[in-house]
Amino acid sequence: IRQNIRLRSWILSKITLIICTKDRPQDLRNLLGSILNQTRMPDRMIVIDGSDDPIAHVLKEFPALNCEYQLVRPPSLPKQRNIGIKMLGVEDSWVGFLDDDLVLVVDALEELERFVEREAGLAGKELVGVGLAINNEGLMAFHWWRFFLLLDKRPGGVFTPSGCPAAIRSVHHDLDVEWLYGGATFWKSIVYREFGFDEWFDGTGYYEDVDFSYRVSRKYRLALSPKSRCFHYHHPVRKEKLFPLGVWQITGWWYFVSKTKDFSSLFVLWSMLGLAANNVVLGLLSPSTGRLKRGLGN
């Protein structure tokens, strides 16, 4: 009986992947290759391309994946996500948004399905969002001064009183969270009937995942699946982008807390000043890191 129930659940569960990409053909190849090797293949794949030089030709190298393709110009991460959502149908059960610079561990989707099946029947809020654990991020150190500045909070994956999302640490146990990364996360499709990505974040996409997942977490349950794992080969920020990034760290954060009205303005200002001071001081101590430009942007 258990085998029949599991088989029925396996058949009825449909996993759809949406990959938003821009100007990273080799990264996309690496991700698609890891998907092709999965022990549990996705049922549908959608690629939303914002590239200056469209990369539809990359998909032809992976005919077995049968990827659907949509070009979006001008590029915008929240817009690309929303276009992907509009392409979904009622048969798409769980939808994963994957950054193009990820590589999935071979059983990531299989472990994700097992996690959802195990957790779905628990009492309390309905589980609608599941994040992948990222192997190469390690356990981010917890520093007392970041806690003092309301920039971090144990165990991670929650919000500080200033509306700052505490870092999601790559744990090896189940963890309920209040926010999830935008590019390594699976959502139950019912979420998209109520929520969309705010296109105010057009341009950088910075904080758009925090804004989206925070709104969802007020009503539903979000969790990190420790056995559903991937690698994130993050591209370093170019020097000319460090100052604008510093500006966006503050403006995106301020927009988010102003929109939600759930956090103390005093705490918010305290954390923002602390973040700016922290980046400036670290930048002066280690000029090669580029923290000074980001701090001046802050």
Image (cartoon, rainbow, N blue to C red):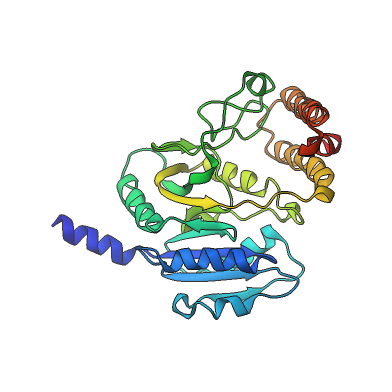
Residue 71 shows in this picture: yes
Q: Quadrant where the N terminus lies?
A: bottom left
| The image quarter in which residue 298 lies | top right
Give the percent coordinates (x, y) of residue 164. 66, 33
Give the percent coordinates (x, y) of residue 207. 68, 45
Against 138, residue 11 (above or below) is below
Task: Count up the numbered dots.
Answer: 0
Looking at the image, which residue is at 58% across and 35% down? 167
Q: Is residue 218 left or right of residue 291?
A: left
> Which is more toward the observer, 63 or 202?
63
Looking at the image, which residue is at 50% across and 28% down? 155
Q: Is residue 21 left or right of residue 203?
A: left
Against 284, residue 240 (above or below) is below
Residue 87 shows in this picture: no
> Which is more toward the observer, 163 or 275?
275
Q: Is residue 282 left or right of residue 130?
A: right
Give the percent coordinates (x, y) of residue 250. 78, 38
Against 242, residue 298 (above or below) is above
Give the percent coordinates (x, y) of residue 73. 75, 71
> Which is more toward the observer, 208 or 297?
297
> Which is more toward the observer, 147 or 208?
147
Q: Is residue 4 left or right of residue 168?
A: left
Looking at the image, which residue is at 46% across and 48% down? 130
Q: Residue furthest left?
A: 1
